[in-house]
Image (tube, rainbow, N blue to C red):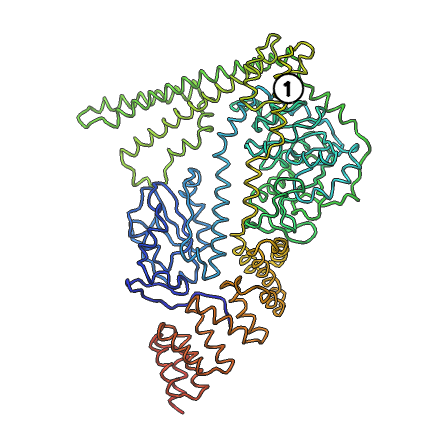
Amino acid sequence: MSIESSVTPIFSVTQFGETYLPSVNRTLFENQPSEKLFEREYPNLFTKENHLYVIVGTDSGLLANYVLEHKLPKGSRYLFVELESVMALMNIEIPENVKDRVKVHSLATFAEAIEQDPIPVYFIKKATRTYKSQAAKYAYITEYVSLLSNVEKIMEQQTFVHSETLNQKLFVKRQLENVADNLVPAKVLSESFSGKSCIILAGGPSLDESLPWVINHQEELVIFAVSRICRQLCSIGLIPDIVVSVDPYEASFDVSKEMLTLPESVLFINSNHIEPRLLANWRGPSVYTGSYLPWNSEETDANISTVGPTVTNAAVKVAASMGFEQILLAGTDLCFSSSGDTHAKGSLEAAAGANMSIIGDWVDTYNGSKAETSIQMVHAREALEYEVTQLQAGQKIFNLSAQAAMVKGIEHRPTSNIQLSGPLEKSTVITKLTQPPPRKERIQKISDAKIQLNKAYESLKSIHDASVEALKINTVLKTTKSSHSDAYYRSLLGRIDKIEQQLSERYSSMYQFIKFFGYAEFTQFLTPTDSSEWQRKDLFFMSDAYYRAVRSSAEQLIQLISQAQEKVSLRLEELSPNANSGVLFRKWAEYQEFGRAMIWQKANMGILSGLQLGQIQALNEKFNELIHQKSNYSKRIEKSHSKLDQVERKLLLLQSTHNGFGLSQLAAILKSRAATDKEAGRLYRLADCFYHQLKGEHSLALGTLLKLDESQLTEREFKEMASLGLKVQKPEISLLALDKLIEYSDEYYPLYASVLKLTGQYQHAAETYLEYLNKYPGDVVTWIKFGQFMVEAGERDMAISAFHQAEQADPGNAVAKQYLSELYHQ
């Protein structure tokens, strides 16, 4: 007997005349019309034009009909994703005029449709929204848990792929902010350590295993460290030779700021778009990857490029470019640990504990086990596999951790099998190659940057003015009446064509860059609306959208360049022998560049006044406060890691995929919290129950649930107890559980009746069957079961009546016909 809820082909009709599947929606629509419920649950379902709405489940078809009964916003599409077992029972008729805009998919067809035009346009424009139907929200049918998870993963994947093209605005902003500090390109390091060995220390959970070996062999290795682990390294006295950081986000500063306490001998390799406070406050030598200016593609080819999506990917790229023959990876797990940790000990994430709300993919590890991972790490692994194909002959990458996710082309090698060639003259080589330019050269470099920024500023002003003129002409075109001659109309179009030609020819490079920078604005020019729906006014709208995007992008870039010019002027002021210290101190505080006070003091040793030294001391104190204060990022991490609201859903997914590794790991994590968190205790018992069931240990599975207080038990635990009671031949436990389950839903009555019969309570069983069948006379399967029960009980007339009811509900039912034939011939 199966206790798991499943889709049954029984429909009910509400008092409002609406037909639904009770197994899917239970009694949700019995006390109110579906329209009222949907209006309350989905108030924004029809508010936005040119949006993609993905809805998991159709609520027995009622939610799909609700959408079809409304006027759809222009350009918006509605994709329903439904269980195939539910789709087989429904016939949703979609009118011909909206067939391209409303579709009901299975998971398989949805995965294909999401990549077909024009759907990607919605992701490019960040115009997507995923909704849960009531069926998916409550998941009375457990398959909805898996369906929702798979749809969310598909949406997350598409969002991740397309978001890379929408984040460039922040990257450009950071690159311009860093123009005054990106003075030495990373290409100076090319082939500087040919034939040597290095190790890249990343922030994965396995990092701690390798650190003792690294400490013992630090003179034989060039040590790279990703910026976020500097706090851990400083705490054990391990000073890296090189620190690498690439992220432009503010959170990168929060997790990496301890690197600013490292000795000045350490080299900082940063992307051109690094979070500017890390670079501006850095006291030692630094080199940058990527191009110097965002519109300068020629230099990008010459310098070592910045790769992603993680800082480890960038570090591997740099190490390979430096010629290292043996590149070792430590803490590059690309997956979570068996205890659910996402980062190494000492990190903010590790301090917050395992994040059990993540529902990720599972990958193979070098030790033959499986581990959970995130979509970001999946892409990082793919990028790493590509970098392996770009290695020079003789270069090898080895991962020191057996717990790391397997990467094609990278072999796991324990530290005991690593061969090193002896001490390296690393500091001498690094210092010689990355020596900051003298004051005079630095002034010249920054002055040249100022000239280039000024040229870009003037070009952008011209492009901006041209776009304003084009918009004025387009406004005239939109309001031109039919009384005007065709010649006048064509002359206006000709003026716009001339403006476009001028922009494309005279400002070709900057005009292309504007389109790259303003990609988000230019997506407004794109439309998912079918071209057959276009009208003349739509063409004017698109022309308007295009030149508004040009104007807006130019305005934003003009502002960013103005800010970059201000930063450049500040750096030139720092280098001036007659610097205005009041301006310097004020601006450093404004930009949170407190560490520059120490840099300036060192460069002007012996010539500063007592007042200036006092102000520098105040800025030093601010610098220390900035380094040691608890960040908002840390608080957000702690809050997100403490949530348990996704854990039961995750357990059900692990159970449905028979993932014993995942259940065992999650059970151990929950057990550690059970003493202080009652809900964690319930979920631990449920995880332990699922794990034992997968191993076929049904008595242990039941035993772990029986240890819960009755106040902790939910429908899920009662269902498992009812099922397990039958498996271990303890039907009395099943009866107790089913007695509770019938309070949740009528769907449990047939099984309750069967178990009553099994325990010899025949009268009660018959009454339970009839109570249910009076309410659901269309349940053919239960009529047949009741008829069989009556045959066994010798109640011939009751049996005949039951099989007639089954035949009436399902004319031609072979089982009912067979029984009736036998009963009439007795």
Counting from the top left corner in percent of width and height, residue 183 is at: 62, 20
Q: Say if 793 sits above or below 158 in the image.
A: below
Counting from the top left corner in percent of width and height, residue 25 is at: 39, 61
Q: Mark 1 highlights which residue?
A: 617
**Res 473 quadrant in image:** top left
Q: Residue at x 53, y 61 (%)?
A: 712
Q: Is residue 394 visible?
A: no
Q: Residue furthest bottom?
A: 826
Counting from the top left corner in percent of width and height, residue 823 is at: 40, 88
Q: Say if 319 sits above or below 209 in the image.
A: above
Q: Residue at x 44, y 74 (%)?
A: 750
178 relative position to 88: left or right? right
Q: In the image shown, does 253 or 176 lie closer to the viewer?
A: 253
Q: Please, what secondary structure does the residue beneath circle 1 have? A: helix
Q: Is residue 31 visible?
A: yes
Q: Say if 554 sits above or below 340 in the image.
A: above
